Amino acid sequence: MTSSATRILSSVFGYDTFRDSQQEIIDHLIEGGHSLVLMPTGGGKSLCYQIPALVREGTGLVVSPLIALMQDQVNALRQVGVRAACLNSSLPLDEIRRVEGQLLRGELDLVYLAPERLLQDSTLEFLDRCRLSLVAIDEAHCISRWGHDFRPEYLQLDILRDRWPELPVLACTATADERTRREIVTKLRLGEGRVFVTGFDRPNIRYRVTPKINEKRQLLDFIRGEHENDAGIVYCLSRKRTEQVAKFLVDNGLKAMPYHAGLSAGVRHRHQDRFLNEDGLIIVATIAFGMGIDKPDVRFVAHLDLPKSIEAYYQETGRAGRDGLAANAWMAYGMQDVILHTRLAEESDADEIYKRSERQKLDTMLGYCETVSCRRQLLLEYFGESLPEPCGNCDTCLEPVDTFDGTEAAQKLLSCVARTGQRFGALYIIDVLRGSESERIGRFGHDLLSTYGIGTEFDVWQWRSIIRQMVTRGLLAVDLEGYGGLRLTPAARPVLQGEGKLLLRQETAAMARAKKPKKKKATVAILFEGGAEADGEANQALFESLRELRRTTAAEQEVPPYVIFHDKTLAAMALHRPTDEAEFLQISGVGQAKLERYGERFLAVIRESS
């Protein structure tokens, strides 16, 4: 079995060796065992069921939540010579009948279905007549009511175990904490199946978080400084905001488009199609966009608003750098994000247990933003994984955060909140602390308080940072009944009484503005950093020529460019410059089918550049 799987890995997919636990997972599935696989985005989850489907007799059945995702995978599989198809509502009736005929005749290696279609009685009865080899359930975290991508249909997938008890089931996802893993195993009735956790770390992604000053301008500076002409995704909380930010980027000379559930299906499809098929395009989206995106060369994911949980943040940032090349996860956040998320949770129709869970997730997300230690260590710790040493590839590692003894500042702040009646918002409290002469303060008589004017040592920006940190640490809470007023929590009492020292992040607006974008490196240099020849202009020029050939080839076939070859494969061609078919086949990502389809065209460009 292992020899068959290894041969397929090389001849079909063009890779020499398996990564992490891939081989063990594949062998387990080929032998008929059930499993839950947790593997980071870009880690090669799909190979864990695609290769067994090619080894076992029959057709592999893949449950996928989005049409775009299944079509993308089908296109990629056909490029390497795998007989794959999908059944979904976007297909015309004659195409559905054609695919069904292929299934009945055993002419397909893999077929992809959405859970809604699979669960129809007519579909199940039809599949009873087909010879199936296995069942793979992609994006398995969708089964969890506590997760960020819950799909009710996933709860019904346990009927597959009754329907075809002899078939091995593989459930896979990139995002699931311990609670969600237990849920998946229980609700899919995987029984004694094995759980494979290959790790959550994405070392090629650089994590960076910054407080909001002028977030749209901050985003623009980030993109221009580090990602000019790169593909990226910008996440916002509201539909209106996605359109405003997309327009802002376009007005400033960038290629950007909005994407949200309020747009018509046709517009969403066109925008997504352009994003997949064009280079250097930016999608500004709500969370409605992303899970179905298999694009490997997304160089950055930016959040202009705070995600509601670490799971959501990890899932969304994981869409950057699927090809293993360097990528950025950049986020700006502020107190208004906290207020909005808290209000949304409190005003929902969910029960108190769910609301408490949402509050805990938000608190953890805030803790991640405000940490002074390695962000990657904190992120991995959330998923039960440890990183012995700081990663060296996040902002807190690269630019360590200064701290200061904030005990006295915290006492001044807490006293001021208490003396003004615990009903005013952050900006008003700051005005009192800084001794503002506003009419409103005089009208309330707060200019007569002992806390009036006692905080002039900090500017408005610094006080906003202190308040944000106090909310994060649970010393202050935001009153959602009124207008976002601050109130003390029981945890504030020890601080007011001077019991212990309180260390806070040292932040100023000038410090945030002073963070300059890093200079963008050429793709070949990024991939082969450390080799002198990798930085050559000739190699980068060849890489761009190969990219152009890939673009025209993809346009001819009406598939996304990365389905032809990934950037990583093109960069390897540019560096190693194969001269014949045997050498071309040695490039990672080139299998026999792609050699036959594209070898001569790409070799011709390489030869011309030599």
Image: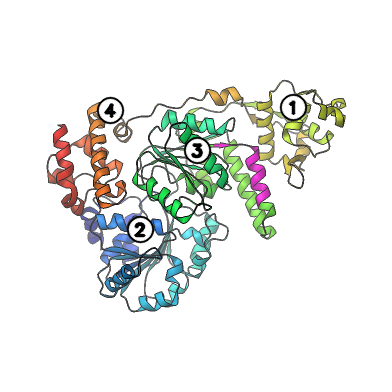
| Distance in Å between CA atoms under marks 4 and 1 | 52 Å
Disc 1: which residue: 408
Q: Position of residue 517 (x, y in %)?
A: 46, 27
Residue 535 badge? 4
Disc 2: which residue: 71
Amino acid carrying mark 1 in the image: Glu
Amino acid carrying mark 3 in the image: Lys
Q: Which mark is first along the chain, 1 or 4?
A: 1
Q: Which image quadrant is residue 34 in? A: bottom left
Q: Which mark is first along the chain, 4 or 2?
A: 2
| Distance in Å between CA atoms under marks 4 and 3 | 36 Å
Q: Which mark is first along the chain, 2 or 1?
A: 2
Q: Secondary structure at mark 3?
A: helix
Q: Which mark is first along the chain, 3 or 4?
A: 3
Magenta includes 342? yes
| Distance in Å between CA atoms under marks 2 and 4 | 36 Å
Q: Main secondary structure of the magenta part?
A: helix
Q: Position of residue 349 (x, y in %)?
A: 67, 59
